[in-house]
Image (cartoon, grey):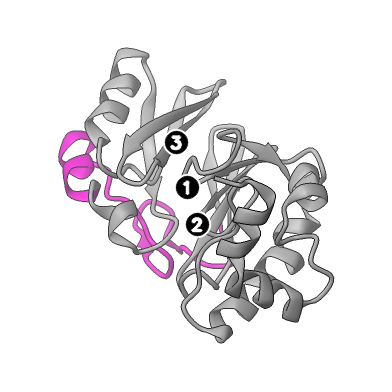
C-alpha cells in the first residue's frame, strides 16, 4: 500500500508505504504535517518501523522532531546509521520491510546527500526527479551530477516503475520511469550539455510551451 500525503509547504509530498503481509510501514519525508501521517497509520493498524528523508533541506526535514515524538521513529538521512539493522543509509543498502525491501539509491545533484528509495515497483525520488521536471541545482557541478544520477541510476529501472516525487509540481502527482524517459523535457535532452542549457533557459522554455 502506498498512501500519499500533501503535507504543505511548496506542494510537498510525504508517503507511507506499507507491506500488506505484515502491516509494517516506512514513512518518507514527513514534513510540515507529520501528525497526519502518524495518525493515519495508527487508525489503520499500520506499524511504522522506518522513516527516511530524501535529503537534508528544511522543507523535507522540518517535521522530523514532531514525527519522532509521535511515533518513536527518528527519520534517517544519507550517511546515518540505523540502529535496528546496523546499516548506514548509503548506496546499495537494503532495509527489510516485511516481504519488501527498501533499497537506497544515492542520487547526488540537487544536494550531495540526495537519495531515492526503491520499494517494490515504486521509486520515491525526492527532489531528484519530478513529473515533467528535475530538481534544481545551484552550480554546473551539481547539474552534471544530477544528470548522471538520473541517467545512470533511475533510468535503468524497469519502464513500469512508478515514480513518486517530493513535490506535486507536474501535471499529475505520480508517473512512471517510461513516461518520464519519453516525455520529460530534461530527460529527452541528448547530452549533459543540452540538459544544463535547458536548466539555464527553463523559464523561457516554460513560457514557449505553456508549462505552469
Q: Nearer the viewer, mark 1 or mark 3?
A: 1
The residue carrying mark 3 is: 15
Q: Position of residue 33 (x, y in %)?
A: 25, 35
- The rendered magenta stretch, by its main secondary structure, is classed as loop
Q: What residue lies at 39% left-to-right and 43% top-to-bottom? A: 50
Please say if the residues under marks 1 and 2 sit with CB atoms less than 8 Å apart.
Answer: yes
In whole angstroms, how far apart are the C-alphas of marks 1 and 2? 5 Å
Q: Earlier in the sequence, mark 1 or mark 2?
A: 2
Residue 92 lies in the magenta stretch: yes
Closer to us: 145 or 171:
171
In the image, 34: left or right of 26?
left
Residue 148 is at least partly visible in this image: no
**Given this view, does label 3 or label 2 mark the residue nearer the observer?**
2
Rendering coords of residue 190 (x, y %):
84, 70
x 17%, y 42%: residue: 66
Which residues fall within the magenta stretch? Answer: 64-93
Taking the spot 70% from the left edge, 37% from the top edge, the residue there is 121
Lower position in the chain sequence, tag 3 or tag 2: 3
Where does the image place residue 55, in percent across and percent down from the top left? 41, 61
Look at 39% across and 54% down and name the residue there.
Answer: 53
Residue at the disc numbered 1: 166
Task: Name the disc covering residue 127, or none.
Answer: 2
Determine whether 38 is above or below 138 in the image: above
Amino acid at each position: 500500500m502506498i498512501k500519499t500525503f500533501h503535507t504543505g509547504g511548496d506542494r510537498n509530498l510525504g508517503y507511507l508505504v506499507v507491506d500488506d503481509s505484515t502491516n509494517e510501514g516506512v514513512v518518507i519525508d514527513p514534513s510540515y504535517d507529520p501528525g497526519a501521517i502518524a495518525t493515519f497509520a495508527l487508525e489503520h493498524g499500520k506499524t511504522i518501523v522506518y522513516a527516511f528523508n530524501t535529503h537534508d533541506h528544511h522543507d523535507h526535514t522540518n517535521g522530523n522532531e514532531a514525527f519522532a515524538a509521535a511515533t518513536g521513529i527518528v527519520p534517517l538521512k544519507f550517511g546515518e546509521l540505523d540502529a535496528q539493522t546496523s546499516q548506514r543509509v548509503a548506496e546499495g543498502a537494503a532495509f527489510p520491510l516485511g516481504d519488501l525491501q527498501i533499497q537506497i539509491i544515492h542520487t547526488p545533484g540537487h544536494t550531495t546527500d540526495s537519495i531515492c528509495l526503491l520499494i517494490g515497483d515504486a521509486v520515491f525520488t525526492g527532489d531528484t526527479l519530478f513529473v515533467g521536471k528535475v530538481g534544481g541545482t545551484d552550480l554546473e557541478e551539481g547539474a552534471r551530477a544530477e544528470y548522471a544520477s538520473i541517467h545512470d541510476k533511475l533510468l535503468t529501472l524497469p519502464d513500469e516503475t512508478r515514480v513518486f516525487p517530493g513535490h506535486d509540481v507536474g501535471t499529475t502527482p505520480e508517473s512512471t520511469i517510461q513516461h518520464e524517459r519519453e516525455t520529460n523535457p530534461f530527460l529527452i535532452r541528448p547530452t549533459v550539455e543540452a540538459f544544463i542549457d535547458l536548466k539555464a533557459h527553463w523559464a523561457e522554455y516554460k513560457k514557449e510551451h505553456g508549462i505552469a
